[in-house]
Amino acid sequence: MTSTLTKPPADPVPTPPRRARRAKAGRAGGQMHAGPLAYGILVLFTVVSLFPLVWTAIAASRDNQRLAQTPPPFWFGANLFDKLQIAWVDANLGEAFLNTTLVAGTSALTIVFLSTIAGFAFAKLRFKGRNALLLIVIGTMTVPPQLSIIPLYMMVAKLDWSDQLQAVILPSLVNAFGVFFMRQYLLQALPDEIIEAARVDGASSWRVVWHVVFPVARPAMAVLGMLMFVQTWNDFLWPFLVLTQNGSPTVQVALAGLGRGYTPDQALIMAGALLGTLPLLLVFAVFGKQIVGGIMQGAVKG
Amino acid sequence: MTSRHDTAAPPAKGGAAPGRPPAGDAAEAERKRARLSRRWQRDMRWSPYAFISPFFLLFLAFGLFPLIYTGWASLHTVELTAPTDMTWVGLRNYTRIFDDEFFWNAARNTLTIGIISTVPQLLMAMGIAHILNYKLRGSTFYRVAMLAPYATSIAAASLVFVLLFGRDYGMINWVLNLVGIDNVDWQNEHWASQFAVSSIIIWRWTGYNALIYLAAMQAIPQDLYESAALDGASRWRQFVHVTLPSLRPTILFTVVVSTIGASQVFGEPLLFDANKGASGGSQHQFQTLGLYLYEQGWINQHLGRASAIAWTMFLILIVIGLVNSLISRRLRASS
């Protein structure tokens, strides 16, 4: 439920470029080297961060009998692929993966598109009420979406949308963070001269968006897309309420069903958890640097 | 959604290129130019609104309207089985909740779990960020590695932690045994279970917050440190007198966000003892307000009462927000 996953940028007073540039100049100056103690703490923290994930795989490769012994297993057993296969079938993970990919993909793409055009308008276009509207956008970030679930649930019931993916996709599209994130990026990355040049050539606002804004914004759009994909992929409460395990669950809903039962097969649960996490871990392994950069950018540029 | 843009931003076919009249009738060209220029003006005036309107429409439909409607529903009796039949009951839902000991129990648990999960989390994040701000070999690796929990879903993380916190065969009790501590019943003891639930939250969010702090630290001008060093300030004093004051807005911000997150905790306690349903443990010892809301609305099927819980949570958040802005204003005034 801590689905404030992408925490909005740090301080909402938008004077970013100067600060960021000064930061770079500052860092070029002499900075303290880390001592062995610092490395020790970092390594410990890294181990704590990664261990539960590794151990998920270890537990998934064992069986109930081995997991009910001390000391607990520290290395892989022989059952990993069997358990992964059973979990895949039992929890109907194939369909869940398809559903979640659809939900997270559609949400991420739509959020990125809408955030980019709105962010562009707030960053570069002049219109009446711009500042007030921007304040409202920022204000909406502080309203936890979970407080709206009951009317949303009533809507879903009325429209007969339970177990339909649009019931999950539509509410997830409200995303002020994305608007703010893109605004902050475009404020800095998109020079006014380019827009004016395009205007002089007679380009309409839509052409400017299509031929100028999108190409410039592409890196930020990619980062935002990944962050939103992760957030929607991991979303729990709302999908849990409107999707059922036997209907069209997302991965998280399917996983929640694995933990029930009188004597649940622990290894199987771990196999399911592993499968549900693996795609995102792969994304992080490949694009980790960009994601870290994006999160930090969002934090300071606010 | 996108269909709205068409009305506001006319297609640019032919381009609004003034000053290039086609050869021929001058009056015709003049009319055409006027038309293009009108279109151009319309585009300049309205397309900004077209660009931001999808966000606001979505927010109205799926953010603001439901929020207000929750308040309306909280004044009615609404059953889960017939969510559209509403009977006016005034404030009775609220009095029912306030008379329910489990509401207060959940409120207490939300508060204590919120504190146990947020305070150590932000303190550790600060320390880690400070270390990451040193010159480091392999800094990217550490940053990505500590973000791995953030990529793990609540469901997956909770399921793993349930095993790690197992009473008889869990890894954590095994380690505690090694240092001579007896098995702890992490699911059934009051404080132990709250700590265990909190640890899931801490695990998932510390690295992320560390990156937020790190970003803010890197924005601190280096000359502040240099002049502090010239004044003979130790590393610790530099941290206290230069780093912390510069991070104040970021710290306040993470506190606000964590508070909102803490008030909403749901998935971790739900899955930490999945066989107990939404009761949050055998004695409700880790039932949070989020879980209590779910129990009232979806297990006991009283959506009206659940709405009253939601609005109570909302009001609590507003109060916290006001207190927070008061504090930050006072801090700003004093600095």
Image: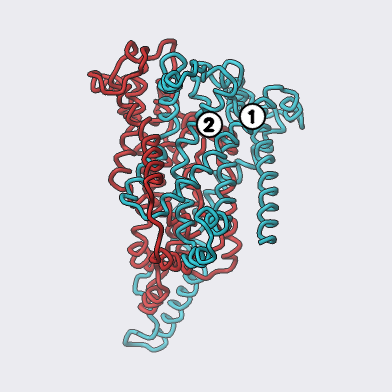
Q: Is residue B61 left or right of residue B307?
A: left
Residue B90 vertical placement versus A40 (above, below): above
Q: Residues within 10 Å of mark 1 (few under 14, many from 20)?
A: many
Report the residue marked by disc 1.
B306
Which kind of residue does numbered mark 1 sit on? Ala
- Name the image quarter holding residue A92: top left
| Tag 1 secondary structure | helix
Residue B328 vertical placement versus B108 (above, below): below
Of callouts 2 and 1, the N-terminal one:
2
- Name the image quarter holding residue B10: bottom left
Q: Is residue B228 visible?
A: yes
Comparing B225 with A275, the one in front is B225
Check contact, mark 2 vs mark 1: CB within 8 A.
no
Distance of label 2 from label 1 (alpha carbons): 24 Å
Which kind of residue does numbered mark 2 sit on? Ser
Q: Which label sits on residue B198?
A: 2
